[in-house]
Amino acid sequence: MSAIPLQQSLDGSADPLAALLAQVAEGRRDAFESLYRQTSATMLGICLRVLRDREEAEDVLQEVYVAVWSKAAQFDQQRARAMTWLGTIARNRAIDRVRARPSPALHEPIEDHELADDEAPTPAAGIDAALERAQLDDCMDQLEPKRRSLIRTAFFENVTYDVLALRAEAPLGSVKSWIRRGLQQLKACLER
Amino acid sequence: MNDIAPALPPIDDDDLLAGEYALGVLDPDARRATQRRIDADRDFAARVARWDAHFSPWLLRVDAVEPGAQVWPRIRTSLGWSAVEGHRKGLWDNAAFWRGTTALAVAASVFAVAIGVWRTPEPAAPVPPPVVVVQPPPATDEAAALPVTVLATDDGNTGWIARVAPDRSKVLMVPKPRPLDAGGKVNELWIIASGEAPKSLGFVSNDKAHSIDIPATLRDAVAAGAVFAVTLEPEQGLPHAAPSGPVVAKGQILSI
């Protein structure tokens, strides 16, 4: 029983997108189109949250799927859920794009991203996703407010250390150490 | 260190760097260097993936937004494929198949039998009754030219096949089954005569073939050169005076 790797027992074959990705890795264009139809709306949502510009977000979306076609073989079901793998590619490409813009947003104050949309996770998201979310929320709640707020802002506004420091009106070194300390604490909580 | 937190297990620098990368806080140089490392170092890539999994509840808590119809063809083009599915098209997307008289007669009859539409016998019946379906259609010019209009979606796939009765009293709409609109909207069929505003022909199903009566006032508009279009519209108020939603599929009538 304990021989089953954790990820597999969590995900097992219950990740239909992972099966599609495996077919995409074999060069199946029909699988690639299905993957696009099933995931592109979420993926565009991810790009839009970073870029806040529809046209640019669709540009990045295009890049992302071209990358997915060539990188599908690198997807490892033992390591990640397919939607997380895909969404992470989208977020990272969108961040690269937003950072390439002439002037980043420096002026908005730090807000506490309490995420008002705390509706119950949809059944479709699956029990594992619901558990992971509860765990992340729980571990974030254990952080000291300043660290929690900085980590949330970093994630949801995709800003770098320098911008965070400017916006928090705190020395860069302090911001770095708050975030690193927060990450360390978060990891200890999430992986215990 | 004046933290109240009890002694934390030490975090190794690689894990910390992986976490900073996943969070997105690294400055551009450090970020690029980290990306190169991810590509080159499997162990490090696994550490980043673990952080990505930790943050995935935030990543995926996002409003889904349907991309525009032009994105998929652009992806195909970027990959060096044709913008629309070419020789790998299924029969559904092959207009030649649909223009083939025997195939059309068989297909339409199958739908007619299955769904019980298109019952009205007509002098110039476009569809032979089911009992004679196995017979090839008479080899007259008329039969050989049984025309259909393909309503194509933006990505070039077939959305519906339209077949107008020779007396223009009705049009048989055969959909390529598609999912219902998530927003609860329905498909509405329009006829657009050259240079004129669209006129509604009412509801058209997303998954069942059915015939739609063409009001006498619109029969003249249903002619070669006019365009059939399907848009997504609220169910309430059908048929509408004018379209308000996006075009789902359209096709020009070549002949009737």
Image: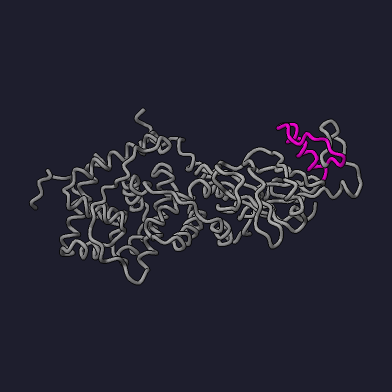
Question: Residue pushed farthest top?
Answer: A1
Q: Please tell me in which quadrant of the rendered image residue A150 appears.
A: bottom left
Question: Among all residues in the image, which is located at the extreme front?
Answer: B217
Q: Which residues are magenta?
A: B101-125
Q: Is residue A73 left or right of residue A7?
A: right
Q: Is residue B130 magenta?
A: no
Q: Position of residue B183 (x, y in %)?
A: 50, 44
Total residue callouts: 0
On the question of residue A70 being in view, the answer is no
Q: Residue at x 36, y 46 (%)?
A: B61
Residue B14 location (% of width, % of height)? 27, 54
A16 or B63: nearer the eye? B63
| Type of secondary structure dominating the magenta stretch | helix
Rendered location of residue A55, percent (x, y): 47, 62
Q: How is the image coloured?
A: one colour
Q: Is residue A17 above or below residue A59?
A: above
The quadrant where residue B127 appears:
top right
Residue situated in front as seen by the camera: B146 or B94: B146
Q: Is residue A65 visible?
A: yes
Q: Relative to A43, is B12 on the left or the right?
A: left
Residue found at x 42% / y 52%: A45
Q: Give the image location of residue B9, x and y in percent.
A: 18, 45
Query: Between B174 and A41, which is closer to the camera in this rendering?
Result: B174
- Residue B124 is a magenta residue: yes
The vertical placement of A124 against A181, above or below, is above
